[in-house]
Image: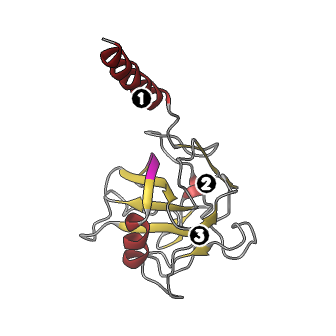
Amino acid sequence: MFRSFTVVALLTLSLSSTVFAESLKLSSQDIADGEFMSKAQEFTGFGCSGGDLSPQLTWSGVPEGTKSFAITAYDPDAPTGSGWWHWQIVNIPLNVTELTAGAGSTKKDLAPTGSMQITNDYGNRGFGGACPPAGHGIHHYRFTVHALSVEKLELPEGASGALAGYMINANTIETSTIESLYKRD
């Protein structure tokens, strides 16, 4: 009887800690899940005239075993057959849990020390804002924080978005995403 009680108690404690464990959570002062982004997050070029400003991002609930972070911004609706990488920043140190608005600009010194910005699908390193084709409807922009199991992703200078994505996914412990919207009429 004592053995059965012990097993039940251990299972209950195990399930309780799982239920109450905090999970990774991404939030922002500039973008929101299911809401349209502002002109500030629109690209400058390709017929778009926005601010090309990466949004402010904060994350919490860092899972055990995390050694660094990566942020990605991806549009699965781009008419390319493979979507569109707007931003990939990797090797964000463990002690960093916020990126200020504009951290995706390589012209400003706002990205965390030691981080690396990957070339986006516009052909530029850093953040490239939303610029869906006019009249193409609503596009979904997935901003994701990845908690990584390695301190540094070993990527060559000029690494492609596909290679960076592979390395990010191969080393991800947990993710959290904000899916914002944008369209041009």
Label 3's element? Answer: strand
Residue for point 48% across, 54% down: 143
Residue for point 28% across, 66% down: 79
Q: Please, is residue 5 above or below residue 140 in the view?
A: above
Residue for point 57% across, 53% down: 39
* Front: mark 2 or 1: 1
Q: 161 left or right of 52? A: left
- Estimate the spatial distance between the alpha carbons at disc 3 and disc 2, rounded to whole Å: 18 Å
Label 1's element? Answer: helix
Which quarter of the figure has residue 94?
bottom right
The residue carrying pointer 3 sits among few (fewer than 14), some (14 to 19) or many (20 or more) residues within 10 Å by Cα, namely many
Q: Which mark is residue 14?
A: 1
Residue for point 52% across, 76% down: 118
Percent across and percent down for residue 149 are 49, 62
Residue 178 falls within the magenta-colored stretch: yes
Q: Magenta segment, principal secondary structure?
A: strand
Q: 29 left or right of 179? A: right
The residue carrying pointer 2 sits among few (fewer than 14), some (14 to 19) or many (20 or more) residues within 10 Å by Cα, namely many
The numbered mark, 3 or 1, whose residue comes first in the sequence reads 1
Question: Quick check: marks 2 and 1 in contact, CB under 8 Å?
Answer: no
- Number of marks present in the image shown: 3
Q: Please, is residue 106 above or below residue 185 in the view?
A: below
Q: Which mark is residue 117?
A: none
Closer to the camera in the image, 174 or 119: 174
Closer to the camera in the image, 121 or 20: 20
Percent across and percent down for residue 65 are 53, 54
Residue 124 falls within the magenta-colored stretch: no
Label 2's element? Answer: loop
Closer to the camera in the image, 75 or 111: 111
Magenta residues? 174-180
Residue type at the position of mark 3: Asn
Q: Which mark is residue 91?
A: 3
